[in-house]
Image (cartoon, rainbow, N blue to C red):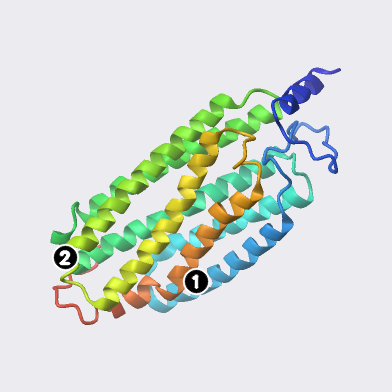
Amino acid sequence: MSSREDACASAAARGGYVDPNWPRPDTAGSACIIIYGYVPSIIVCALALALFFIALVLHSWLLFKYKTWYFIPVTVGLVMELVGYISRTFSSQQNPYAVIYFVIQYFFIVVAPVTFSAAIYTLISIAINRIGRQFAPIAPKLILWIFIVCDVIATIVQIAGAALIGVAYSNGKDPTTPNNILLAGLAFQVLSFFLFIGVFVAFLWRSRKATTRNFKTFAAATFAATLAVYLRTVFRLAETAEGLMANLSTHEVYFGCLEFLPIVIAVYIFTWWHPGRWLGNKHKKGKALADAQVRVEPQKA
């Protein structure tokens, strides 16, 4: 038995998944096991591609209609989701053992929600500027700088961990250390996002007497989208903390309900409660601010 065969036998013995109906390719770019823990479903991939493409068309139209250029990160994130699920489709239909397909889909599907978070940070910063900076626990610019930098750091660590996991599986080695790196990045992201939610809630509470019913409706929708994105991040943390090839990571139903579905909910919430319609742009107030009894400051974001 060759050294690669020995390594693959060892990886399978540690609980790695090998599909009995899908022969393992003996190529350098293929892992000894299917890193996903299952062969990705083509139904989930097709549904994701359809929903994210429709959302991309809608958000692109709304972006140009309202000229809310501060919300561009959402369209960027939707493009990344599409790239990620295209790569996942290749895993499903061509080679589920291919490390490159796994790494590409992981990179884009993990990074895409970060752009949605950045859009939410920007949106809240603009809302604070327009409703009144005195209602926020920290300055709008600090919200952008602190939480975007935290997300960038967390994402870099996660991508490094995921890439190292792919390399470890490709070489038939123990992926525990790379998984711990991934876990650290996710834990940091969950903590920083939790702190942002605290800032968001504090702003809503302090400004409750100075805002209109329309603004409160928009804020509630934004908060629901924020929680959806946060749920997805918490799921990723729980999945990684449980360990590789454990229950959460080896059953696609969890991925579908706690990774894919929350992001779909978030992006579609913002099709109706789009900030262009509700907050407006630097030239025009939106529906949520039309009857506000507070001084509206110029948009600086």
Residue 5, percent from left and from top: 81, 23
Name the residue rendered at 36%, 48% in the picture: 193
Residue 272, percent from left and from top: 44, 75
Relative to 215, residue 301 above or below: above
When asked about the image quadrant of residue 98, the answer is top right
* Mark 2, secondary structure of its residue: loop
Q: How crowded is mark 1: few (under 14 residues within 10 Å), some or many (20 or more)?
A: some
Quadrant, the C terminus: bottom left
Question: Quick check: can you spot residue 279?
Answer: no
* Mark 1, secondary structure of its residue: helix
Tell me the kind of residue under disc 1.
Answer: Ser
Relative to 213, residue 51 above or below: above
Tell me the kind of residue under disc 2.
Answer: Gly
Residue at the extreme front of the image, as rendered: 247
Q: Which of marks 1 and 2 is nearer the N terminus?
A: 1
Of residue 113 and residue 27, the one placed in the foreground of this image is 113
Name the residue rendered at 42%, 40% in the picture: 154
Question: Quick check: can you spot residue 5?
Answer: yes
Residue 88, percent from left and from top: 67, 51
Tags 1 and 2 in contact by the CB under 8 Å rule? no
Name the residue rendered at 67%, 58% in the picture: 44
Quadrant, the N terminus: top right
- Which residue is under mark 2? 132
Drawn side of residue 50 relative to residue 6, left or right: left
Q: Nearer the viewer, mark 1 or mark 2?
A: 2
Q: Residues within 10 Å of mark 2 (few under 14, many from 20)?
A: some
Drawn side of residue 2 relative to residue 152, left or right: right
Relative to 52, residue 256 above or below: above
CA separation in Å, label 1 and label 2: 29 Å
**Which disc number belongs to residue 43?**
none
Residue 283, percent from left and from top: 27, 77
**Which disc number belongs to residue 60?**
1
